[in-house]
Amino acid sequence: MLIYTLPKLPYAFDALEPYIDAKTMEIHYTKHHQAYVDNLNAALAKHPNECLPSLEKMLQDFNSIPSDIREAVRNNGGGHFNHSLFWQLMKKGGGGQPVGKLKSDIEEQFGSFESFKAQLSETAKSRFGSGWAWLSMDKDGSLQIGSTPNQDTLLHESLDPIVGLDVWEHAYYLKYQNKRVDYIAAWWNVVNWQTAEDFYQIALKKL
Ligand code: MN3
């Protein structure tokens, strides 16, 4: 049976200050992400003798998850998957412009980086309730902006995640309260564009 663990955070809790405060990072990582991992493991422990598909496979096809743990794996496995991406997509001294092929393809497909940024910000702002905003790559290789509710992942839509933004209140409430728009504007200053380019290159290789 697979046991999932919290991935190491690639920076200190205060590394993303002042855009994302240390207390939010600490609670988000050690409490929220840890809870997704613990709840995922607890669900999987109900099927100790079964050879279950990989987490990615289960999140792609919910019917591959035993029915009694389907919701738990969808929500907590999704939470673990999404947050594992999210931490890597931020860094101290991040922000600025995309790099590499992602930069030129964003400019080509969205007109300009500013236009792309405005569209992703609007999608993040208008996600009702809790969820995520994404830049992803579709099966035909095109880039697209979208969002998922709760902890649903892009795997279920057969899209490859390139950039993801957590817009759950737990990601910003301590510092920004109800001002999600301010959090979104601040988050652009910590985006790790090299990781986004790496994810893009991995996705392109699958075409
Ligand atoms: Mn979160």
Image: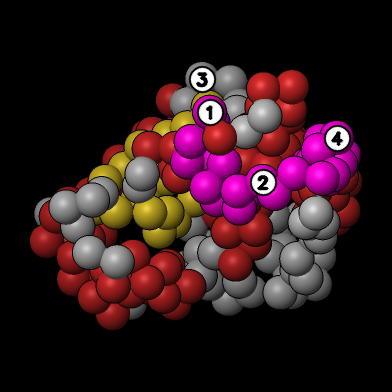
Is 13 left, or right, of 64 in this rendering? right
Whether residue 169 is visible, yes or no, is no
**Label 4 neighbour load within 10 Å: few <14, some 14-19, many 20+:** few
| Residue type of the residue flagged with mark 1 | Asn
Which residue is rendered at x = 48% and y = 73% of the image? 195
Whether 83 is drawn above or below 169: the answer is below
Give the quadrant of the N terminus: bottom right
Q: Which residue shows up at 87% across the image and 53% down it?
A: 30
Residue at mark 2: 52
Give the spatial CA distance, label 1 vs label 3: 26 Å
Q: Is residue 134 visible?
A: yes
Q: Determine the CA span between mark 1 and mark 4.
A: 17 Å
Q: Earlier in the sequence, mark 1 or mark 2?
A: 2
Does ligand 1 reach within 8 Å of label 1's beta carbon? Answer: no
Q: CA distance from mark 2 to mark 3?
A: 33 Å
Instruction: Identify the mark nearer the N-term, 1 or 4.
Output: 4
Graded by Cα atoms within 10 Å as few (under 14), some (14 to 19) or many (20 or more), the crowding at tag 3 reads: some
Q: Which residues are magenta?
A: 40-63
Question: Mark 3 highlights which residue?
Answer: 128
What separation in Å lies between label 1 and label 2 (alpha carbons)? Answer: 12 Å
Q: Which residue is mark 4?
A: 46
Q: Amino acid at mark 3?
A: Phe
